[in-house]
Amino acid sequence: NAGVTQTPKFRILKIGQSMTLQCTQDMNHNYMYWYRQDPGMGLKLIYYSVGAGITDKGEVPNGYNVSRSTTEDFPLRLELAAPSQTSVYFCASSYSPGFEAEKLFFGSGTQLSVL
Amino acid sequence: AQSVSQHNHHVILSEAASLELGCNYSYGGTVNLFWYVQYPGQHLQLLLKYFSGDPLVKGIKGFEAEFIKSKFSFNLRKPSVQWSDTAEYFCAVMLMDSSYKLIFGSGTRLLVRP
């Protein structure tokens, strides 16, 4: 199994540009999460999804959008990139958030710089 | 709003010293609790977890954590650290309501000097 795959690994954007960070998992997981990791700030939850067609805001959703049209894919969209969105982005997925929550799989991350 | 606090941002220890990293959360409902470790250049890895039962849980690599419900705390401990424990440690709390949000603390960077 490939697990959780994120693309691209690195990207440089100009202020105001838009882009989509892709995340796909092949484990038939219901729960998917997008986090950003900033130095000294830990991981902040941007958006999450509990299944296809269902998404909800996390701690820091402003400036981002998501969709979950299939179980496998959970893309994160930046419409108007700002320097404050420079960060490392992690996608994660889990089959069940309850007893099996330790089986939280993380992608390898996307390093985004907005200049 | 729910939050997770890790008060020690940077910790420097010598090998064989004992470690305790603090973690507190703010949420009145049922939670599952986790400690993750991130070694330089690597993904997050699960160290240990608490769901229910014995509040003292043991994880990999000699780590343990104690859940004190009255203090909303889940502190991580290790009796004797090694140089290889140099990493960033994250406490995480999963809200066991319908959202199942997994909220991370800001992390603690541990440097163990040989």
Image: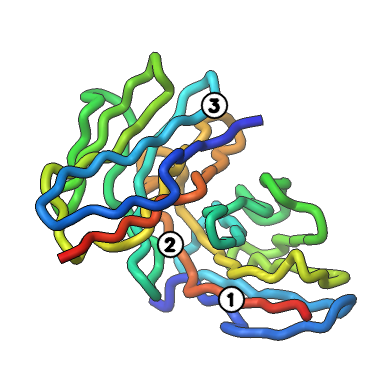
What residue is drawn where x is 36% and y is 71%? B40
The chain letter under disc 1 is: A
Q: Are the residues flagged by discs 2 and 3 from a single subunit?
A: no
Quarter in which the C terminus of chain A is drawn? bottom right
Figure colour scheme: rainbow
* Residue A18 in view: yes
Is residue B88 positioned above or below B5 on the image? Answer: below
Read off the residue under disc 3.
B26
Dot label at residue B63 = none
Whether tag 1 and tag 3 are in contact, CB under 8 A, the answer is: no
For discs 2 and 3, the disc positioned in front in the rendered view: 3
Read off the residue under disc 2.
A105
Is residue B101 positioned above or below B15 on the image? Answer: above
What residue is drawn where x is 68% and y is 45%? A59
Read off the residue under disc 1.
A110
Q: Residues within 10 Å of mark 2 (few under 14, many from 20)?
A: many
Is B65 placed left or right of B33 in the picture?
left
The chain letter under disc 2 is: A
Whether tag 2 and tag 1 are in contact, CB under 8 A, the answer is: no
What residue is drawn where x is 53% and y is 73%? A109
For discs 2 and 1, the disc positioned in front in the rendered view: 1
> Mark 2 vs mark 1: which is more N-terminal?
2
Q: Are the residues flagged by discs 1 and 3 from a single subunit?
A: no
The chain letter under disc 3 is: B
Q: Residues within 10 Å of mark 1 (few under 14, many from 20)?
A: many
Towards the viewer: A71 or B76:
B76
Residue A16 in picture, x, y percent from top left: 89, 76
Amino acid type, mark 3? Ser
Q: For numbered disc 1, what is the local secondary structure? A: strand
Amino acid type, mark 2? Phe
Q: CA distance from mark 2 to mark 1?
A: 15 Å
